Image: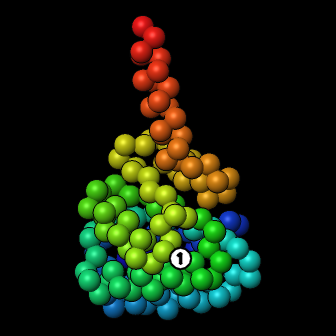
């Protein structure tokens, strides 16, 4: 299952369950139409909390979609997930397609405010990874004072 929604910031994508390769190919065709309709830079919010691992063919189709996004003006994206296997799969895909540096991953199973952090990244460029590192550093520093 997938859904594509145009928003004020760009595109909101939802992926869930098992998505066969042919269904992912349909997503690419629909996604291309939406990307082509946007005439400026945009952001992408991806909710894949319920997605199952993708087949090789479905992964290849996702690579096509990610390349379309970047070449079509995507500035930043955030991927919300809840499965470490899915994260590994999508980090690999993002590195292959060259969008990794513009994409952030948030684990909804450990981050209660995942939606807020995701929106802060895509619309305000507040990196959820750097804020995590800063708060960890602060805890270490504060605990060292005791």
Residue occupied by mark 1: 4
Please tell me which residue is depicted at 38% across the width and 65% down the height of the picture: 91
Locate residue 71, reporting x and y percent.
60, 83
- Secondary structure found at label 1: strand
Quarter holding residue 36: bottom right
Image position of 63 (left or right of 45): left
Q: Position of residue 42 (x, y in %)?
A: 67, 71
Residue 10 lies in what quarter of the image?
A: bottom right
Q: Is residue 60 above or below residue 51?
A: below
Q: Is residue 7 visible?
A: no
The residue under the point 59% across, 65% down is 76
Whether residue 24 is situated above or below residue 50 in the rendered picture: below
The correct choice, above or below, for 145 with respect to 51 in the image is above
Q: Which quadrant of the figure has residue 5?
A: bottom right
Q: Nearer the viewer, residue 16 or 84?
A: 84
Residue 9 drawn at (x, y percent): 68, 65
């Amino acid at each position: 299952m997938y859904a594509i929604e145009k928003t004020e910031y760009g595109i909101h994508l939802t992926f869930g369950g098992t998505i066969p390769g042919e269904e992912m190919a349909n997503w690419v065709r629909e996604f291309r139409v939406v990307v082509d309709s946007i005439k400026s830079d945009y952001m992408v919010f991806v909710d894949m909390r319920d997605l199952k691992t993708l087949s090789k063919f479905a992964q290849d189709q996702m690579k096509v979609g990610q390349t379309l996004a970047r070449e079509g003006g995507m500035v930043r994206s955030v991927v919300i997930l809840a499965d470490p296997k899915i994260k590994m799969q999508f980090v690999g895909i993002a590195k292959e397609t060259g969008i990794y540096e513009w994409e952030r991953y948030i684990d909804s199973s450990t981050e209660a405010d995942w939606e807020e952090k995701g929106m802060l990244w895509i619309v305000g460029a507040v990196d959820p990874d750097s804020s995590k590192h800063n708060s960890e550093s602060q805890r270490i520093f504060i605990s060292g004072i005791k």
